[in-house]
């Protein structure tokens, strides 16, 4: 009796039609598949699984991902992305005579923002080489 | 702790990677050392040879560099072992190098042997070797009709192969449009057409549908090469124009030479997979004398048990798992369909009707094998 009720419920809600439609779509997809297609898809999935396995078990990469996930780091990455864009624009529009040479380099090094960036970079390199160091670069 | 794997086939590779995954921290800190010794720097997906024999895969599709499949930290040497000195916990290689160990895993596999059946090698085609699979495809491609006999030696690797080969021969000739010119004859050495009863029950109506003649109790004795006749120990014979064989197999000679096991099969405990009378030597895959299927899936499932137990023995001094005899075999049928057989020491297989989906899964697994070898799947 319960089975009849369930069956009626399936019919009323068009679920049966939907199931038949889905089954027909799967069957049609199966017919369209060749051994070659299956092989290529499976090879791509297989290599993807291997790559994912290697990446997720790489502790160095995972800790880098964790660091990159920090809000401060994301903000810095956004700034980096923006800087890369504006830097490219600046270089395109810069007067060729102002670029290069010792005087151009010295002029750039006098910029407080550039100096701050160099300090931060030096601090990062120091940390990588000497993780326990607390020295300020 | 030094863990030594002898043999870099399916079983040895999966087991070594399994242990390396479990003990990766210990390997990095130098507390555990894993070494693998193999006879070759190549790794072959042996079930793929059946597809090579029917022109569905190329040899290059089923081979990778062994070192590319191993977990970082596993030391790999192409230098086969010649002497096992179990009392001293060491082995000696062909190059004369001595490797000591705390735990040893022997996974040297088995190989086809033809010398027991005179005339078999020169008169038959087989998908069991690389050269054989390529040669078999060329013969099948050029075959124009006649009597095709499938003959089976025992013991042999991949228990399903005789049935699968017959299905695939039927399909191959049907697609070439010459099936009506081919008389397909299947033979099997025991009283039914397969040693697993449920597979035999399932295959009989399929064979009848495909009009495959079958004869049981047919143990190859010799092949009359000139007259193209196979004689059986039972006194019957089969004429053929094309002879396809599943050759008899033996364990490796090095196992017998070192008195580790008769005919190259190592006496092994069916649950712990420990070599009999040893407490730090495992045997794995085709190498064991266990009365179960010699197939890749057996080696795969055994590898998981051995991997877990070696890690557990290292950490707690106790093994935690036992092998339940699990085997899983795909069975390629005709018309782009396949089914499967899954069984263990207790439960026999229940064979379902072949489907296209199962064939697709098998084709997919042929690609996913490399994930299995790495210990992922």
Image (tube, coloured by chain):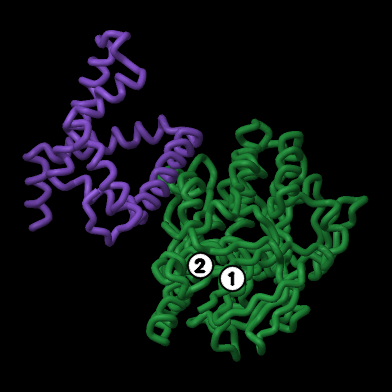
Chain colours: A purple, B green
Residue under the point 65% across and 37% down? B173
Q: Where is residue B236, by image quadrant?
A: bottom right
Q: Is residue B256 left or right of residue B36?
A: right
Residue linked to disc 2: B15
Residue under the point 17% across and 36% down? A18
Q: Residue furthest right?
A: B226
Q: Is residue B163 left or right of residue B221?
A: left
Classify the position of the C terminus of chain B by image quarter: bottom left
Residue under the point 19% across and 37% down? A116
**Residue B251 spot, x, y in % from top left:** 70, 71
**Residue B281 spot, x, y in % from top left:** 58, 82
Q: Where is residue A97, by image quadrant?
A: top left
Toward the viewer: B181 or B265?
A: B265
Residue linked to disc 1: B5
Q: Is residue B355 visible?
A: no
Neighbours of disc 2 within 10 Å: few (<14), some (14-19), many (20+): many
Q: Where is residue A86, by image quadrant?
A: top left
Earlier sequence position, callout 2 versus callout 1: 1
Q: Mark 2 touching mark 1, by CB under 8 A?
A: yes
Numbered label tally: 2
Neighbours of disc 1 within 10 Å: few (<14), some (14-19), many (20+): many
Toward the viewer: B54 or A108?
A: A108
Tell which subunit mark 2 falls on.
B
Real-space Cα distance between discs 2 and 1? 9 Å
Q: Is residue A5 left or right of residue B10?
A: left
- In the image, residue A60 above or below residue B316: above
Task: Say which element carries label 2.
Answer: helix
Both labels 2 and 1 in a single chain: yes
Residue under the point 75% across and 78% down? B256
Task: Say which element carries label 1.
Answer: strand
**Residue A129 spot, x, y in % from top left:** 35, 54
Toward the viewer: B62 or A89?
A: A89
């Amino acid at each position: 009796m319960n089975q009849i009720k369930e069956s009626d419920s399936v019919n009323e809600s068009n679920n049966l039609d939907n199931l038949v439609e889905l089954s027909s779509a799967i069957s049609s997809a199966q017919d369209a598949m060749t051994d070659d297609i299956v092989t290529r898809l499976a090879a791509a999935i297989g290599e993807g699984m291997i790559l994912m396995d290697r990446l997720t078990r790489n502790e160095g990469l995972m800790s880098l991902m964790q660091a990159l996930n920090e809000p401060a780091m994301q903000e810095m990455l956004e700034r980096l992305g923006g800087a890369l864009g504006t830097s490219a624009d600046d270089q395109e529009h810069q007067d060729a005579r102002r670029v290069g040479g010792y005087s151009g380099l010295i002029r750039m090094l006098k910029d407080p923002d550039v100096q701050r960036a160099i300090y931060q970079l030096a601090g990062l390199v120091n940390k990588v080489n000497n993780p326990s160091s607390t020295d300020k670069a | 702790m030094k863990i030594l794997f002898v043999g870099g086939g399916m079983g040895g590779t999966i087991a070594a990677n399994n242990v390396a995954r479990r003990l990766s921290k210990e390997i990095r800190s130098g507390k555990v050392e894993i070494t693998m010794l193999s006879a070759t720097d190549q790794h072959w997906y042996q079930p793929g040879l059946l597809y090579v024999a029917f022109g569905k895969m190329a040899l290059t599709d089923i081979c990778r560099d062994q070192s590319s499949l191993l977990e970082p930290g596993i030391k790999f040497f192409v230098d086969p072992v010649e002497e096992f000195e179990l009392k001293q916990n060491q082995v000696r290689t062909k190059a004369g190098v001595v490797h000591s160990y705390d735990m040893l895993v022997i996974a040297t596999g088995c190989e086809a042997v033809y010398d027991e059946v005179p005339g078999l090698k020169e008169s038959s085609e087989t998908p069991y070797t690389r050269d054989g699979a390529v040669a078999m495809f060329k013969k099948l491609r050029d075959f124009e009709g006649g009597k095709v006999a499938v003959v089976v030696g025992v013991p042999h690797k991949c228990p399903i192969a005789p049935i699968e080969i017959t299905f695939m021969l039927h399909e191959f000739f049907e697609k070439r449009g010459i099936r009506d010119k081919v008389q397909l004859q299947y033979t099997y050495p025991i009283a039914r057409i397969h040693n697993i009863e449920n597979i035999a029950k399932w295959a009989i109506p399929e064979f009848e549908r495909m009009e495959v003649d079958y004869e049981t109790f047919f143990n190859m004795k010799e092949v009359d090469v000139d007259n193209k006749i196979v004689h059986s120990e039972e006194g019957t014979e089969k004429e053929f124009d094309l002879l396809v064989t599943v050759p008899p197999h033996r364990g490796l000679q090095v196992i017998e030479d070192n008195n580790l096991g008769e005919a190259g099969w190592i006496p092994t405990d069916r649950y712990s997979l420990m070599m009999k009378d040893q407490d730090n030597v495992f045997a794995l895959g085709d190498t064991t004398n266990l009365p179960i299927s010699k197939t890749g899936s057996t080696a795969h499932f055994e590898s998981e048990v051995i991997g877990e137990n070696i890690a557990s023995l290292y950490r707690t001094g106790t093994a935690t798992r036992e092998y339940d005899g699990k085997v899983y075999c795909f069975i390629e049928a005709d018309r782009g369909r396949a089914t499967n057989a899954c069984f263990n020491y207790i439960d026999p297989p229940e064979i379902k009707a072949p489907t296209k989906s199962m064939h697709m899964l098998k084709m997919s697994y042929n690609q996913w094998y490399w994930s299995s070898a790495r210990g992922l799947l």
